[in-house]
Image (cartoon, rainbow, N blue to C red):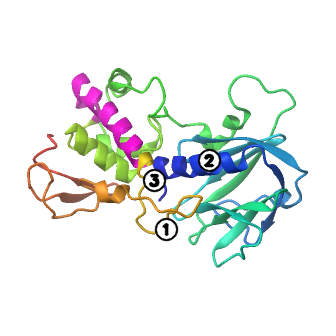
Amino acid sequence: MPELPEVEVTRQALSPHVTGQIWVGAVIRESRLRHPVPQELASSDPQQVLQVRRRGKYLVLEMSHGALIVHLGMSGTLRYLTQAVPAQRHEHVDLLFADGSLVRYRDPRRFGALLWVPRPPEVSGAPFWQSHPCFSRMGLEPLEAGFDGAWFYRVTRGLKGAIKPLLLEGRLVVGAGNIYACESLFLAGIDPRRAAGRIGLERYHRLAQAVRQVLEQAIQAGGSTLRDFVGALGEGGYFQHQHQVYGRTGQPCARCATPIVQIRQGQRSTWYCPRCQRF
């Protein structure tokens, strides 16, 4: 599933190509995604793309008359192409621009979403699209100000659940999906089974720093391409070659040579080093 780094890589690739473009409509070949694709996208009045933003794992194309919110689901990608490139299987929606270019949405599993939020007549304060319900329970952005060990320690007091599933929930911190939660906990030396409320301040300082470092390194590497993910210009990511624990069941830890262990937490697999990550 594309996580924060993959979505941010897509945003960075799309932004210089589509910001300032005039969006003239869409071709919808398959509307049955996680939510039905709004049919009004196909007949939209021309409007300018003002900026391309990201919130958690959502990509947002903010436009003159509204905002298009895109979630890539489990297998979605966005590609920047020309309208001369024919659509292939699983390529469900084209966003068309006046200069003959397009952004094509591909999603074999069809678990992603394209949502439209009209711009209110008067907009002030926070971005208007953040009023959409999909953003209502999101936590802090780990790459922005305010995300640090002191905050992490404060908001986890009294929590009995394990730290790894808590990272995935998104209520406290957004975008640290399964790959990057496993890698961050390894870098911080924290056992993924440890109760969040029993982790001390110093270890939370290490964890906050580790989450930020892992995400930044993954973005620089173009994300992780494990199955379907490619960036908006067709390039694959290569952070998977830097994984220390994720997907490395039984392989020696790069630090201590102890075999990496795989367990189940909730409905997700977790990988960790039982020697380097103290309980």
Looking at the image, which is closer to me, 171 or 158? 171
The residue wearing badge 3 is 222
Residue at figure coordinates x 63%, y 74% from the top left: 90
The first of marks 1 and 2 along the sequence is: 2
Task: Say if the magenta span includes residue 217.
Answer: yes
Residue sitting nearer the eye, 235 or 156: 235
Q: Is residue 203 above or below residue 107?
A: above
Task: From the top left corner, tell me how far across and down residue 38 is, in percent.
Answer: 78, 58
Would you name the residue on which mark 1 appears? Answer: 228
Residue 248 x/y as whole percent? 23, 62
Residue beneath disc 2: 59
Q: Secondary structure at mark 3?
A: loop
- Between 24 and 148, the one nearer to me in the picture: 24
Q: Residue 168: horizontal and vertical position, in percent?
A: 41, 46
136 over 238 or under it: above or below: above
Task: Tell me where the magenta segment starts and ends, as one range.
Answer: 196-218
Tell me if 59 is positioned left or right of 219 in this view: right
Tell me the kind of residue under disc 3.
Answer: Gly
Relative image position of residue 46 (x, y in whole percent): 89, 50
Q: Amino acid at mark 1?
A: Asp
